[in-house]
Image (cartoon, grey):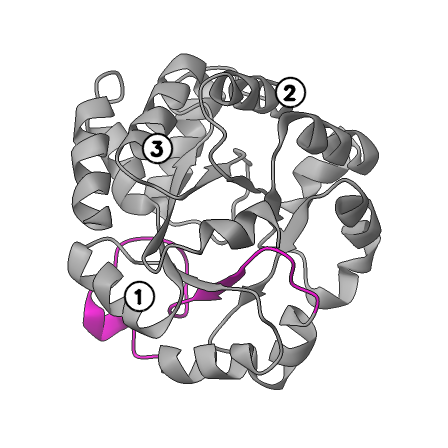
Amino acid sequence: MTKLQDAFSDPKTLVAFTVAGDPNMQKSVDYVLSMVNAGADVIELGIPFSDPTADGPVVQAGGLRAFASGITTTKVFEIVKMIRAQTDVPLVFLSYLNKLFDYGYQAFFEKCQELDVNGVVIPDLPYEERGEIADLAEGHGVSIIPLVAPTSGDRIQKIVKDSTGFVYLVSSLGITGVRDDNEMSHDLSASVAEIKKYTDAPVAVGFGIHTPEQVEKMNEIADGAIIGSGIVKLVENDPDNASAAIEEYVKAIKA
């Protein structure tokens, strides 16, 4: 069992997302530690990218704040080093493939292994092209977290069959951002059942999940829930002093 899979031994596993370097390196670390203190089981750290096609306005704005403070992929790894000095919480990156390519695949996964980064979600990497980095990632103990969308259909078996971390199930069509329940019309329970036919890896549901009620509903369907835009919005509201608000929010979700 990988470190990520072990994190899902809690029947109400919570994955919490923030943008690395939003609004600066130290505050980003502070906000991650607030999420950990509040009970987040896995941290998903977004590497800022100029063209984040899967991200909604809130996360895009977080990336712009990070860029304004001079964040690069190298500095993201420095943030991880600062986090690792204080917690061994399971940690995954959300990154677009260009960031890995630009850094260098070999160097990227070597650094992940060195700093105990356990997985990476790559929204613009289709299954058919995953072979470009799969062996390197596996060789350095990094799980490529597959995304299953409402439109994945008969491709689900291929997408999830080699999962070593967890499967990221997208709740609805479109980009990230808070959603009402009626916007999540996709039959998530059927998708989870289909995924479970082909893998023993846990399934976490993300995109639009932001209230305790939604998280509770997702935990009835899947192995965990992923929250993100709600946290990034708190940073937007008060970039320099969001720690208490983030901790309160994540604690309420976890409860």
Provide the residue designation for mark 2. 74
Q: Where does the image place residue 112, in percent across and percent down from the top left?
A: 67, 32
Q: What separation in Å lies between label 3 and label 2 (alpha carbons)?
A: 23 Å
Classify 10 Å Cα crowding around label 1: few (below 14), some (14-19), many (20 and above): some
| Mark found first going from the N terminus, 3 or 1 | 3
Q: Secondary structure at mark 2?
A: helix
Q: Amino acid at mark 1?
A: Asn
Q: Residues within 10 Å of mark 2 (few under 14, many from 20)?
A: few
Residue nearer the viewer, 82 or 237: 82
Q: How far across and down, in percent of the image, does residue 49 sit?
A: 55, 36
CA–CA distance between discs 3 and 1? 19 Å
Q: Whole-Å distance between the Cαs marked 2 and 1?
A: 35 Å
Kindly check if marks 3 and 2 are in contact, taking CB atoms under 8 A apart as contact. Answer: no
Label 3 belongs to which residue? Answer: 36
What type of secondary structure mainly makes up the magenta span?
loop
Residues at marks 2 and 1 touching, judged by CB atoms closer than 8 Å: no
Disc 1 is placed on an element classified as helix
- Quadrant containing the N terminus is bottom right
The percent position of residue 24, horizontal first and vertical second, equals 41, 16
> Does the segment drawn in magenta span residue 244?
no
Q: Amino acid at mark 3?
A: Val
Left-right relation of 21 to 73: left
167 inside magenta stretch? yes
**Magenta residue span:** 162-186
In the picture shown, does residue 199 fall above or below 136?
A: below
Residue that label 1 marks: 219
Say which residue appears at 29% left-offset and 39% top-offset: 39
Q: Amino acid at mark 2?
A: Thr
